[in-house]
Amino acid sequence: MDLLRNADEASGEEVVDLPIIPQGPPADQMCNLFPLERNAAAESPPGRQVARRYIHLDLKGAPPRPSYLIQLFTFVAEWGASGLLIEWEDMVPFTGRLEVVRSPTCYSRDEVEAILAAAHSAGLDVIPLVQTFGHLEFVLKHQSFARYRERKDEVLCLCPLEEGSIELAKELIQQTRSMHPDATYIHIGCDEVFNLGDCARCRAKAEAAGRQALFLDFVEPLVKECAALGVRALLWHDMLECTDADTLKQRLAADADVVVWNYSTVTSVTSEEWMGLSSAFPRVWGASAFKGASEPDAVWPPMKHHMMNHMAWLDRCETTEMHAVILTGWSRFNHTAALCELLPAALPTLAVCLSVLCYGECSESLHRAALERLQLEHLPLDPSGHDFDSWQHQLPTAASTFPGSAVFSAVARLHSCRTLLTKAEELHRVFCPPHTARLSPQSWQQVLNMATLVSERLGVLRPQIYEHMLPVLFEADVDEFVGAKLDPVSQKAGELVQKMTKLLEMHAPKPREKRPPRNSSCSSCLKKLNLDKSPYDQDGDNSNADWSPTSGAGCTECMGKSRGSRAPVLSMSV
């Protein structure tokens, strides 16, 4: 950094003072955390290891209890994390007019200080994240702040031209900063401002000066406010990628860094966009994902997908200087959306993704080594209901090697039930009316067995979820999880059981009726047995097909009575 600063001084350009951020353990020392068959870090291509790795804690959905977070920090530091990006949302004790935005279960000031102290003790740098423009639902949903909405019928975005909007955003920054006196950075969000330019005043300005000018005129004072408070701002990149590098450098780069997020298995940011952002900002950060970026209501993190996402970031590090990577773990897609994966359920995925960034590679041995420390070496990359029974006995217990392992096990069982029910529903769509007119009782029975198994397992799992989750999460969040993730599955399984039971009963073979005497065509015998029309029953059952009426022949009893002697035995027709 000194060499870069000296070069800037020699060129006469303005020198930007950047905060010093701890790097965490060097990549070549991380091999002690995950012992492999070989020194993976030493054999990785140069530049692929990521020196700084921040874990994003998104508290807008199922926020953990403080005691759980305090216990967790030592583990994530051992797994290779350098710091934390904590998105507090409504979980901090805002004061004054912002007190109304507090969650009913928000942390106290003492609990916030205890959380920060525990992170510091574990050697983790902490960066707070507070939304100030887009994704401001937790503030704008309250009627007292409704006038600041860009669209009066939506709570997503702040109107940048509404009187008092700048002051509201600055107040959020100020109160967040006051709770983090040792922070050197503060992330102020500013991503996905979808409604920007919708109101009449903003639309007029956007048409006159451009949408980017409307955005920058609001964000630049916020960045300056951060600098005045002694912290450097972080900004998500998506609202900046269409702005030319010179404008960004002139208006934001002196006091802010940009964070480029990409959660897919390939880098979606073009080379031109990377070049523009890299030339505008002195530091470029990356943001991957270890949970919450696959499906808006997911229960189980797709480990394989997230590993490939981190491999894409390693590929980017070969061509772009990356200051740090933030491993995001979203709890909801936005404040009002459904819950994504719970944090304890995603910890094995986090451990594997951290090892990928630490070693600069992704391999089977790396995957296994990372999971062995968690006693999950047999965990498949994509466990399904089909193979769950083969490894469920190896699930960790409450006394296992990582915090929340019992929650992980409970969620794994729930995921298995959900997957098994999905397969049962697929079979139902293929083999059952009204999807087909052809009858397949064997398939119906298979669907019934699967749905019954799901229903029985969920009945056992429900009380276990409460038992294991309440020490980790607040009761209201456990209720939400059960109501959103378990109860609908249980209801579907129960309905499928009833439907398949009724279907099987409707088409069950009728009991075999008593056969008439052999070789009988006696009308009285046939009428008596209700078989005067055909030896086949109404459903086509040919259980009586081993006899054939013979013209003029009667049953032995009738013929004996009429002739006074034993009737002759007639040959069977085949």
Image: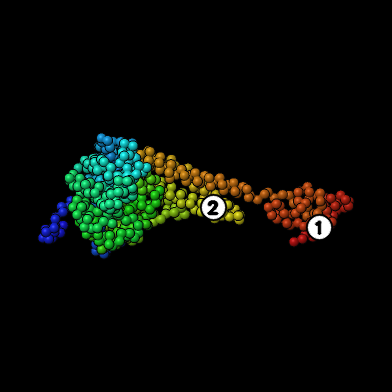
Element at label 1:
loop
Q: What amino acid does circle 2 point to?
A: His
Residue ID at (56%, 45%): 498
In percent of width and height, residue 19 lies at 18, 51
Residue 290 visible to the viewer: yes
The picture places residue 248, in percent across and down from the top left corner, at: 22, 55
**Three-letter amino acid code at the position of disc 1:** Thr
Q: Quadrant of residue 377?
A: bottom left
Q: Position of residue 282 (x, y in %)?
A: 20, 56
At horizontal 32% and vertical 42% (from top left) the residue drawn is: 149
Question: Which residue is tagged 2?
Answer: 428
The Cα atoms of the two marked residues, 2 and 1, are separated by: 46 Å
* Of the image marks 2 and 1, the number of the one nearer the N terminus: 2
Residue at the spot x=60%, y=53% of the render? 441
Question: Does 457 sit left or right of 444 as displayed?
Answer: left
* Element on which disc 2 rests: helix
Nearer to us of marks 2 and 1 is: 2
The quarter in which the N terminus is drawn is bottom left
Give the camera-side residue of 95 and 539.
95
The residue pinned by badge 1 equals 550
Which label was assigned to residue 250? none
Q: How many marks?
A: 2
